[in-house]
Image (cartoon, grey):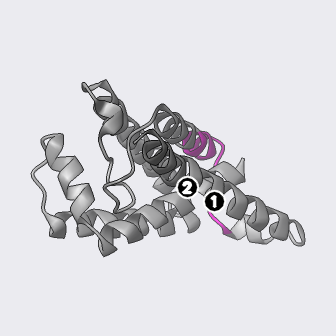
Amino acid sequence: MAVPVLVGIVVLAVAGIAKIRRPGPTAVALRREGVPVGPGGVRVLGAAEIALAVACLAPLPGAVLLLAVAYLGFSAFVARGLARPGGTALGCGCFGRDDVPLTRAHLGLTLVLAASAAAAWATGWAGLGPLLAAGPAVLTLALLTLVGSGLALLVLVDLPRLRTRSSS
């Protein structure tokens, strides 16, 4: 149960950092959806994503539920983009890149991360503390989180970019 939530936390933090470093693609994607935002607003969004990721690691009540809501919001954004004519050619800007098209895999993964966070909240997620107290098992948890996060980023960023390049 903990690994999918930790993957969601890591992916959110990576996306937040990317938005702070390169806000332009996210601003374009949000404006396309009717949200009038500039680079400064995107950087604030990135900082909020990082803050939420950190809050989920601490035993802050409701933080992991907010993570579930955030991933549901991302899912709605992706679903709306995919529903547009030519939607799979549109960039999401999630990771500060304009060459990452929307995919059904992106939608599926964000829905899974939303469900994982909601399940963690429902079962009493208490942050990172209890997980670290698991002794030697914490190494397995860290390794699974690292591998899972890498695979998630591969699905969200690298595979769509490779598919776009190979079809051009």
Residue at image mark 1: 150
| Point 35% across, 53% down: residue | 99
**Tag 1 and tag 2, C-beta contact below 8 Å:** yes
> Which portion, as a residue range, is magenta?
116-128
| Point 18% across, 53% down: residue | 28
Give the farthest residue toward the right.
136
Is disc 2 placed on a helix, strand or loop?
helix
Q: Is residue 59 visible?
A: no
Q: Amino acid at mark 2?
A: Leu
Give the x, y percent position of residue 32: 16, 43
Residue at image mark 2: 153
Give the farthest residue toward the front.
168
Q: Residues within 10 Å of mark 1 (few under 14, many from 20)?
A: some
The quarter of the displayed image where residue 15 is located: bottom left
The quarter of the displayed image where residue 153 is located: bottom right
Is disc 1 placed on a helix, strand or loop?
helix
What's the distance in space between the residues labelled 1 and 2, CA to CA?
5 Å
Q: Amino acid at mark 1?
A: Gly
